[in-house]
């Protein structure tokens, strides 16, 4: 092969060819259509099926006398919006963390962020009787706290020069385990409040939390905007710090901004409906084969697909176990664990075989 | 006089005591072990002393030498405090050793028995048992925990392919995956069982030393005794494991044979501990690290001294828990972290400073 | 005497070794040579019984190694893996002491003779003064020699080394191989070593075994086997082979076919 071709190949990974460009557009088109379809069906399907014209009616000027429209407006729509918010924010967080740590297993749930946020919320509510706004602030602070605990444990114990940043994942899981244990201890101390928070702690997408969404939605939006703005330098970061630096990227600054945006976003998501784990882990892996490694398209695709996955999981949690409604967070955890095992088998065991 | 060890020097110049059959004990390790034992005795005295009913040191010594205390003191000492103390030590010992073993097996300083899903396997099994058979006996709970832990271990070995070629890290990551699935099942149980059952389950999960009775101590005792056999048998294999699978096999270690053995040993110890006081995260990592900071360790001595440090940590965490008076009972895991983590950081800082002055 | 009978090994669907037949004579230093991924390391691992064999058998002194326990094998054969990892805490002395494992009786430690062997191994590689240092803090050349000391301390007749001079500078490459050759000459050990550099093989090996794509291309004494024809069929590379003051030198000239890199 001639050197010129090798050079061209290098450029392809950063700037898609026209052919892949075309595939990208198809993918995004399909994802958007799916999102709309899932959105509508999430509103119409449930314990009682609601006809489409009632759904559209509820969306554009609800009729307060129509029972169906009331259900859609006050129960299903809030739930759906929360699912979309959580899915989009968590998935984008996963993309950014996987890019920054260059580790396929990184996500907000494996790096201690979710557990830290929920510990702070529960701790605040149980010790100091925090209201909703204060709980939101506590969640944001907790997300940072959890992540930095994970970082410091990894830095102190994992002194080995681990190429794939595995000690980070291990310390993240450990920190999460500890935080979850402490959260449970808080829950036990007050049986009255326990029943209020028990569902929240396992990650529950529920219409009751719509007040929280209306308080915190702008945080997630802001974080997503910031991430989209930093997507281009982040793509260069994938090639390694030195390479990115030589291409003119302020590595430290970009890393800090992206990290802060991610942590704030996921903290706000946890504040709304508790730690819904593993979307951040799964979704980037689902979209990567279609859109490649460019962070901008990865982010956009993850936001769309994250929302879709979360909506589908929510629908599954409501429909499969009727008359019970399973907690969406638990449902995601179950699926997430299996996917995690699958990734380990594909990524780590396949390489170990040779 | 044949069986007395003779002093000598090891290959890298450390002072050792050498026995007739060639086994060696490093003098530094021996003195560290003695020092740790002394610390444990002191803390034990403090722990027994602490509480509503006052028992002075003098009375304690008299009680231990056979004389009878008044009824209240007698009850406090023999029914509550001594079992609790013994339990704390044995649990710390077991988890620390399981952690040290797992770190060698996975070749990673962050491997904790909890990370492999072993604890979670035991927990899930116990919760299922409590839900299905509310009147289960201690023995049934213990054995179901063991079955749960062993099931997870078998599943792990099966999932990673069982062969000698798989990397220790793969086992660790697969363990995390299993842990996630199992913990979501646990949450399911807690969420969807009736309120009282759910509360009982959560209470059990939080775990504490409060329900350590003489009976519990007796159930734990066989595992404690068994751990010594394990140390003797497994100790020498571990440092060879850390060289990598191929090098270990070339040195004469059969991975296919010893890996299930080592995993089973860790399962027994950690599930027994989980059944008795609930999961204690981080202890499995902290204890071996602090031990290695105190004195250079390998082989059997590493397990033994890690166990002592683990016991010491849990006893001191228990003392802390009991001396803090608050509305919310401080979970033992939290006070363990409060004590262990600063020690751990201190040890690492000192090590770093030490390294700098050497250069 | 180590014999390899008709062995095939495969990873997934691709055969890495295909019906290989050879034998390694006692007291000789044999170099395994071939391009990346041709199965050199796999051959070593197969001879150590680390891999399941598709066909064939490996005979050690006419015993199938499948029938031997790991300890029995460790008393006969020592092996140095390509990538050596060592925990941070371990000192050179501790590393060397690990080698004795296979010789201890149950529950006992090193005998006096074992300890002499350890000290001798350290002295042989010239690390007697560094025994108390941590392995990971040594320089690359010293670290490699520490590992070789471990292999020596195992005190076996057969020694298998997988690319022992990788990542070493020119001086240490020669020093390490010189040491290996001396062991072969003075102690009658049989050494099989994977090498990448034909010139090093020519300088130190008694015999070379050239491989490509899981098959043996040529085997024989160094002088007669390293020829431009064999080099071309092994590496797909035209090379000038000439004799310079009694030493074989191999200089690559040109890539033989366009198929090599595509």
Image (cartoon, coloured by chain):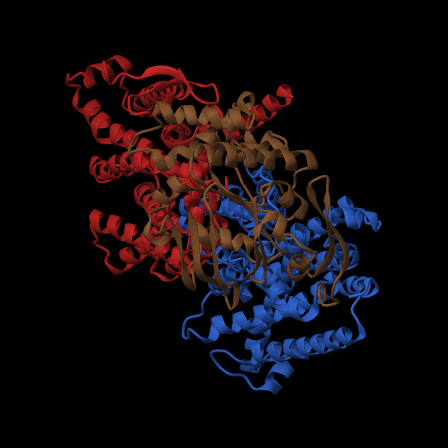
Chain colours: A blue, B red, C brown
Vertically, is A289 above or below B28? Answer: below
Q: Residue at x 54, y 76 (%)?
A: A71
Q: Residue at x 46, y 24 (%)?
A: C119
Measured as percent of width and height from the top left, residue B133 is found at: 23, 58
Residue A204 can be seen in this image: no
Q: Quadrant of residue B34?
A: top left
Vertically, is C247 above or below B116? Answer: above
Q: Is residue A155 left or right of residue C109?
A: right
| Front-most of residues A34 and C186 | C186
| Front-most of residues A302 and B296 | B296
Vertically, is B199 above or below B105? Answer: below
Measured as percent of width and height from the top left, residue A118 is found at: 54, 50
Q: Is residue C78 left or right of residue A163?
A: left
Measured as percent of width and height from the top left, residue B54 is found at: 28, 20
In the rendered image, which quarter contains the C terminus of chain C? bottom right
| Front-most of residues C59 and B330 | C59
Measured as percent of width and height from the top left, residue B18 is found at: 34, 20
């Amino acid at each position: 092969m001639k050197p010129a071709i090798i050079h061209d190949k290098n450029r392809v990974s950063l700037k898609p060819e026209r052919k892949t460009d075309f595939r990208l557009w198809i993918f995004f088109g399909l994802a958007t259509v799916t999102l709309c379809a899932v959105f509508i069906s999430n509103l119409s399907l449930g314990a009682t099926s609601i006809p489409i014209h009632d759904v559209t009616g509820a969306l554009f000027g609800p009729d307060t006398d129509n029972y169906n429209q009331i259900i859609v407006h006050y129960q299903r729509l809030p739930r759906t919006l929360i699912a979309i918010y959580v899915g989009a924010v968590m998935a984008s967080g996963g993309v950014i963390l996987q890019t920054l740590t260059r580790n396929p297993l990184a996500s907000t749930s494996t790096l201690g962020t979710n557990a830290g946020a929920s510990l702070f919320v529960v701790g605040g509510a149980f010790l100091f009787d925090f209201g909703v706004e204060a709980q939101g602030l506590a969640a944001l602070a907790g997300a940072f706290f959890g992540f930095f605990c994970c970082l410091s444990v990894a830095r102190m114990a994992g002194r080995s020069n681990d190429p794939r940043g595995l000690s980070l994942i291990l310390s993240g899981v450990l920190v999460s385990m500890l935080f979850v244990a402490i959260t449970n201890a808080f829950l036990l101390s007050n049986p009255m409040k326990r029943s209020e928070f028990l569902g929240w702690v396992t990650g529950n997408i529920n219409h009751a939390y719509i007040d929280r969404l209306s308080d915190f939605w702008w945080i997630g939006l802001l974080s997503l905007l910031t991430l989209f703005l930093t997507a281009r330098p982040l793509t260069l970061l994938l090639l390694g710090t030195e390479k990115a630096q030589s291409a003119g990227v302020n590595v430290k600054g970009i890393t800090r901004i992206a990290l802060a945006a991610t942590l704030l976003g996921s903290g706000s998501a946890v504040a709304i409906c508790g730690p819904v784990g593993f979307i951040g882990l799964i979704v980037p892996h689902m979209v990567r084969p279609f859109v490649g490694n460019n962070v901008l398209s990865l982010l956009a695709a993850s936001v769309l697909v994250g929302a879709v996955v979360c909506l589908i999981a929510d629908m599954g949690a409501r429909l499969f176990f009727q008359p019970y409604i399973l907690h969406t967070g638990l449902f995601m955890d179950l699926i997430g664990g299996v996917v995690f095992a699958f990734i380990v088998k594909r990524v780590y065991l396949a390489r170990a075989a040779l | 006089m044949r069986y007395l060890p003779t002093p000598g020097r090891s290959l890298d110049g450390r002072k050792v005591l050498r026995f007739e059959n060639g086994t060696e004990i490093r003098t530094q390790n021996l003195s560290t072990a003695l020092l740790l034992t002394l610390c444990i005795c002191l803390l034990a005295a403090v722990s027994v002393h602490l509480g509503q009913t006052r028992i002075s040191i003098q009375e304690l010594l008299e009680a231990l030498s056979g004389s009878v205390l008044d009824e209240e003191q007698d009850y406090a000492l023999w029914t509550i405090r001594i079992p609790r103390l013994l339990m704390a030590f044995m649990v710390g010992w077991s988890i620390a050793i399981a952690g040290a073993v797992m770190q060698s097996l996975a070749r990673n300083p962050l491997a904790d028995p909890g990370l492999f899903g072993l604890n979670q396997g035991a927990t899930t099994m116990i919760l299922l048992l409590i839900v299905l058979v509310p009147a289960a006996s201690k023995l049934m709970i213990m054995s179901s925990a063991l079955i749960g832990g062993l099931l997870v271990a078998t599943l792990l070995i099966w999932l990673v392919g069982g062969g000698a070629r798989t990397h220790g890290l793969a086992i660790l990551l697969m363990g995390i995956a299993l842990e996630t699935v199992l913990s979501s099942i646990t949450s399911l149980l807690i969420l969807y069982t009736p309120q009282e059952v759910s509360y009982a389950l959560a209470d059990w999960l939080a775990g504490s030393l409060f329900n350590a009775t003489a009976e519990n101590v007796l159930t734990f005792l066989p595992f404690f005794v068994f751990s010594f056999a394990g140390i003797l048998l497994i100790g020498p294999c571990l440092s060879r494991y850390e060289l990598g699978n191929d090098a270990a096999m070339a040195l004469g270690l059969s991975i296919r044979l010893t890996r299930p053995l080592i995993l089973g040993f860790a399962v027994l110890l950690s599930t027994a501990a989980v059944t008795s006081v609930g999961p204690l995260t981080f202890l499995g990592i902290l204890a071996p690290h602090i031990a290695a900071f105190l004195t250079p360790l390998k082989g059997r001595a590493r397990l033994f001294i890690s166990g002592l440090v683990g016991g010491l940590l849990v006893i001191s965490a228990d003392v802390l828990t009991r001396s803090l008076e608050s509305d919310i009972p401080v979970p033992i895991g939290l006070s363990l972290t409060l004590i262990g983590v600063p020690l751990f950081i201190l040890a690492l800082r000192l090590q770093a400073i030490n390294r700098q002055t050497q250069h | 005497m180590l014999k390899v009978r008709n062995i095939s090994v495969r990873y997934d669907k691709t055969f890495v070794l295909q019906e290989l037949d050879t034998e390694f004579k006692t007291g000789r230093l044999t170099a395994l040579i071939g391009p990346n991924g041709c199965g050199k390391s796999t051959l070593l691992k197969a001879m150590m019984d680390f891999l399941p064999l598709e066909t064939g058998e490996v005979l050690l002194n006419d015993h199938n190694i499948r029938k031997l326990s790991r300890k029995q094998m460790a008393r006969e054969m020592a092996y140095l893996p390509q990538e050596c990892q060592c925990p941070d805490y371990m000192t050179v002395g501790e590393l060397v002491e690990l080698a004795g494992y296979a010789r201890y009786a149950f529950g006992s430690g090193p005998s006096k003779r074992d300890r002499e062997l350890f000290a001798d191994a350290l002295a042989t590689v010239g690390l007697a003064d560094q025994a108390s240092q941590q392995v990971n803090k040594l320089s690359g050349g010293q670290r490699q020699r520490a590992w070789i000391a471990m292999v020596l301390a195992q005190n076996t007749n057969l020694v298998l080394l997988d690319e022992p001079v990788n990542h070493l500078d020119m001086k240490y490459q020669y020093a390490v191989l010189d040491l290996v050759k001396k062991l072969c000459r003075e102690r009658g050990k049989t050494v099989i070593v994977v090498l990448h550099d034909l010139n090093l093989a020519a300088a130190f090996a008694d015999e070379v075994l050239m491989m490509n794509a899981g098959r043996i291309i040529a085997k024989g004494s160094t002088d007669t086997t390293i020829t431009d024809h064999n080099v071309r069929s092994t590496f797909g590379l035209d090379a000038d082979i000439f004799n310079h003051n009694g030493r074989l030198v191999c200089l690559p000239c040109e890539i033989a076919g366009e198929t090599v890199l595509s």
